[in-house]
Amino acid sequence: MVILILISLTSCKEKELVRYESEFIILFDTVTRIVGFAHSKEEFKEYAQVIYDNLKEYHQLYDIYNDYEGINNIKTINDNAGIKPVKVDQRIIDLLKFSKEVYEKTNGETNIAFGAVLKIWHEYRTEGIDDPDNASLPPIEELKKAAEHTNIEDIIIDEEESTVFLRDPLMSLDVGAVAKGYATEQVSKIVREKGLTSGLLSVGGNVRAINNNIVTGDSWNVGVQDPNSPRGQSILKLVKIDDLSMVTSGDYERYYVVNGEKYNHIIDKDTLYPAEYFSAITIICEDSGMADALSTATFAMPFEEGMEFINSLPGTEAMWVFTDGTIKYSENFESYIKEQS
């Protein structure tokens, strides 16, 4: 893997630190961007390589679509549902335990056992993108039948044996609502331990700040995409984060169109159809995995319910962008917004 390193002119002479940037595509089906300060290009390249290598491992472990030689991953667990326990890496067990905690915290809105339903939507969405003229929606009866096999209690974790078993042969795990954020958080800890003291790691819509900007002494400035701009490329708000995580979920990613209507990838557990309350939700909190899970959960909640939920969580803020462009904030989100000139 070739990692492109860009050198910025920003530097800190007292500490002989220079700002570098790196970017690569492939992992978690998205773009990973790294910004950080190091004493040399070689030092920063080591940090970038650590991030890439570890993200690659997490990507392969948490993949639900592909097999990898010598690796038992989430797909392996799904393939053996109702058949036998699968011996797995501790990082899979840690993710599943975290996901069960998230399930309880979000009252079931973020459910990794929802794979049977999400798989149907994935198939219809893929076919609709490949053949737009014949795009269609899955029958509600098919979705209801799949929803009967989404009990998170049917995920049996044996930590002593390092195995995972899906008790229901028709169930399937889908960790898309938590895996990217969780991996981002873990990798940020690893690269911090390797010596990176000031950086910004962005894996798709999952952004993790490592301390602050050591040159300016200020927080990092991170743009929130405007969901109503072409492909969500314009900046809606500029947000300041210092050793925090920011995650955005929106209807401008992974959607398809049926009869002129857009259907996004975040499925409401009650209707079994895509959530339609908002265009985007941005979460700020300390942990990137939790921010990822909360952005999915609140996207499928009515605003009043979501506002009450977010305001009940210490150190957590949210911004809701409605389909008509209206923006609303949790109690203290606006304190993170940087005024744009």
Image (spheres, grey):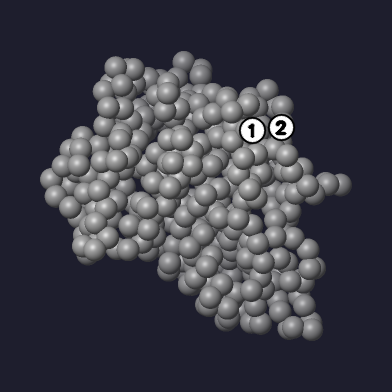
Spatial separation of the CA atoms under disc 2 and disc 1: 9 Å
Q: Residue 260 at what x, y percent from top left?
A: 51, 17
Q: Nearer the viewer, residue 117 or 168?
A: 168
Q: Amino acid at mark 2?
A: Lys
Q: Residue 313 at what x, y percent from top left?
A: 60, 44
Q: Which residue corresponds to the image point at 53% horizontal and 77% vertical from the top-left?
A: 194
Q: Is residue 218 above or below residue 126?
A: below
Residue 233 located left or right of residue 142: right
Q: Is residue 269 above or below residue 241?
A: above
Q: Secondary structure at mark 2?
A: strand
Q: Which residue corresponds to the image point at 71% horizontal and 32% vertical from the top-left?
A: 328
Q: Which residue corresponds to the image point at 59% horizontal and 36% vertical from the top-left?
A: 309
Q: Which residue corresponds to the image point at 27% horizontal and 53% vertical from the top-left?
A: 157
For the question of whether residue 168 can be seen, the reply is yes
Residue lying farthest to the left in this orientation? 83
For the question of whether residue 233 can be seen, the reply is no
Q: Is residue 340 above or below residue 123?
A: below
Q: Residues within 10 Å of mark 2 (few under 14, many from 20)?
A: some
The numbered mark at residue 307 is: 1
Residue 340 located left or right of residue 270: right
Q: Residue 123 at what x, y percent from top left?
A: 32, 32
Comparing labels 2 and 1, the label whose residue is closer to the camera = 1
Q: Is residue 96 above or below residue 69?
A: above
Q: Nearer the viewer, residue 66 or 110?
A: 110
Q: Residue 259 at what x, y percent from top left?
A: 46, 15
Q: Residues within 10 Å of mark 1 (few under 14, many from 20)?
A: many
**Residue under pointer 2:** 328
